[in-house]
Image: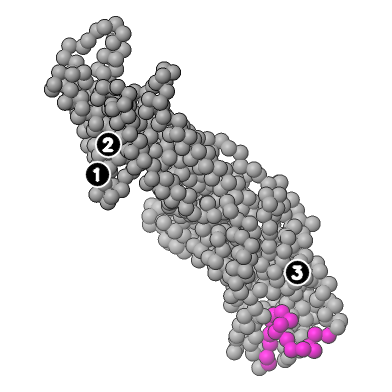
Amino acid sequence: MSKLTSSQRFWISFILIIPMVIQMLAMPFHWMMPGYNWVALITTTLIMLVAALPYWTSAWAAFKHHNANMNTLVAIGTTIAYFYSLFAMITGRPVYFESAAFIAVFVLLGDTMEERMHNNASNALKKLLDLQVKSAMVLRDGQFVAVPLDQVQVGDIVQVKPGQKVPVDGVITSGQTTLDESMITGESMPVSKKAGDTVVGSTINGNGAIQFRVTKVGQDTMLAQIVEMVKKAQTSHAPIQNLTDKISGIFVPAVLIVAIITFVVWYSFLGATMVQAMLFAVAVIVIACPCALGLATPTALMVGTGRAAKMGVLIKDGQALEEINDVKTVVFDKTGTITVGKPTVTDIVGNPAEVLMVAASLETNSEHPLAKAVMKAAEEKQVAPQSVTDFATVEGKGVQATLNGQPAFVGNDKLLANGQITNDLQEKITTLQDEAKTVILVGLNKQVIGLLAIQDAPKPTSAAAIAALKTRGLRTVMLTGDNDRVAAAIAKQVGIDQVIANVLPNEKAEHVQALQQDGKVAFVGDGINDAPALTAANVGIAMGSGTDIVIESGSIVLVQNDLRGVVKALDISKKTFSRIKLNLFWALIYNLIGVPIAAGVFVGVGLQLSPEFAALAMAFSSVSVVTSSLLLNRVRIGNPAPAVQAE
């Protein structure tokens, strides 16, 4: 029986209870089922073994640890009603097997509703996994052949024709197309893809044929990671759940005390029979079962995190969902977060061929976005880099090496000694920086031979997202290693409140901690150097385009690489916790109203609850909380203004 689900136990018990329902319906007509007491005994015993056994087991486990939980009340209520009826049957008195049976069945009704919601959430995740194709067209010995998905390896070249699904994650090597990524990002508009762009497994190819190199397979793919993150989030606890647990820990013993007082008052002072007093006490125990209280938080968390995942916002746990609700300041990295992250060389001051040759030679092995921009410009100008020796990185300043026997450097003005920048050169630097361009100084033989101006434009959606955050009362800050002028120019374009520039990578976490003096801080970033700041923040939000270490450091991941996801996460958090508080309020109000009615306080005005109807009311309180949580799927998540081009 222990392997049966709540739904299976409910339907078995529902079938067993039918004879009692028939007898109850026949009572007004003064008809009594032959041998009804024996029928009631047998069916109630079976129902107790099927339905109530898990509650007894849970209550006993809690008792052994000197605790009491909501199952304690169910177990006590059904046990009292059952064994009293058994005693009454032996001694020839009226029996109340119906009370025990109906209590168990109606409690199971609430559990069945909760189980169904859990199953729906699990099925939704299963459907995501079912999106995966079973095979892929992989290049083998010069030909593309169908290979089972579990045999596809990192580095393989895969072909996807129009209309087919992308089997695994990778980077396009040839061809261009559009992909429907809605099952991953929640965005319905197809996304244009070309050589060098990433593709995600289970997305649907449009009208172009592509080939791509596999970068992730199996549990490392984005789809598998999304499923795992959502699973963890839906089974995690938010800090507010601790409050619920404390309330339940006090509430259950208090209810037992109230039930005892109810029995004593009715039996000793109000002239009720022992049976009547017992029924009042049992009704109190049953209606006060805090099932709705226990469901208030986890059901809302499950729905909230599930909806967030559908919108391309992966929330790793309940704590992150609760923390972002209280955030006062959102701090952004610049490159790749606010900006596109694909900087390009826009201006070259000096001899272009010489400047690019020196810069490319020193930046050949660097993974920094600015270095990639330099290498791309050199490639376009057909300037070949040369080998260097004594290469060294000067953190936060640039790089230096020996090129053709001469010292060379590429970096910012911090790398130079005083007096190396002439007034004319400084004027050019200032002009370029005022245009939101990052200036790289290129030097050879201790002399500045030229400048490279690199621009990384803001994403079209950044200004709208930041404006939306500000309308929600949040302060916005940009934390960047770039210089003051460039940082200020970008900040002005997107509407950032405060700029902290010239920050070395190891200083980002320190600045986040300083900002936490004014309240909780969320940090949004995408680079490896952002990992410490993501960890230091109350809520770390990683861009989906970031590296694995960044995504691991973040407690929220934006799959779409779009800052509007921060707004979505904030709104989902506020809606979810507003719903949790509403659930807790109604669960507590329900008990405050229901317990006095069950105790017989209003018998004088004809308001009374029998144990079985108390169980029904309790079950429907649980159903109402589950329904309230499910309505989160229909609540409008406020979208920021549409994407706009930065000024």
Q: Range of the magenta residues?
A: 406-422
Q: Secondary structure at mark 1?
A: helix
Residue 19, position as x, y percentages in the image: 25, 17
Residue 171, position as x, y percentages in the image: 54, 60
Amino acid type, callout 3: Val
User: Distance between the Cα atoms at labels 1 and 2?
Assistant: 9 Å
Q: Is residue 347 left or right of residue 264?
A: right
Badge 1 vs badge 2, beta-carbon distance below 8 Å: yes
Identify the mark nearer the N-term, 2 or 3. Answer: 2
Amino acid type, callout 1: Trp
For this orientation, the residue located farthest to the top is 29
- Numbered mark located on residue 486 in the image: 3
Q: Secondary structure at mark 2?
A: helix
Asked whether the viewer can see residue 180, the reply is no
The residue that disc 2 covers is 75
Q: Quadrant of residue 28?
A: top left
Q: Quadrant of residue 365?
A: bottom right
Q: Is residue 418 magenta?
A: yes
The residue that disc 1 covers is 60
From the viewer's side, name the closer residue of 274 and 123: 274
The residue that appears at 77% across and 65% down in the rendered structure is 489
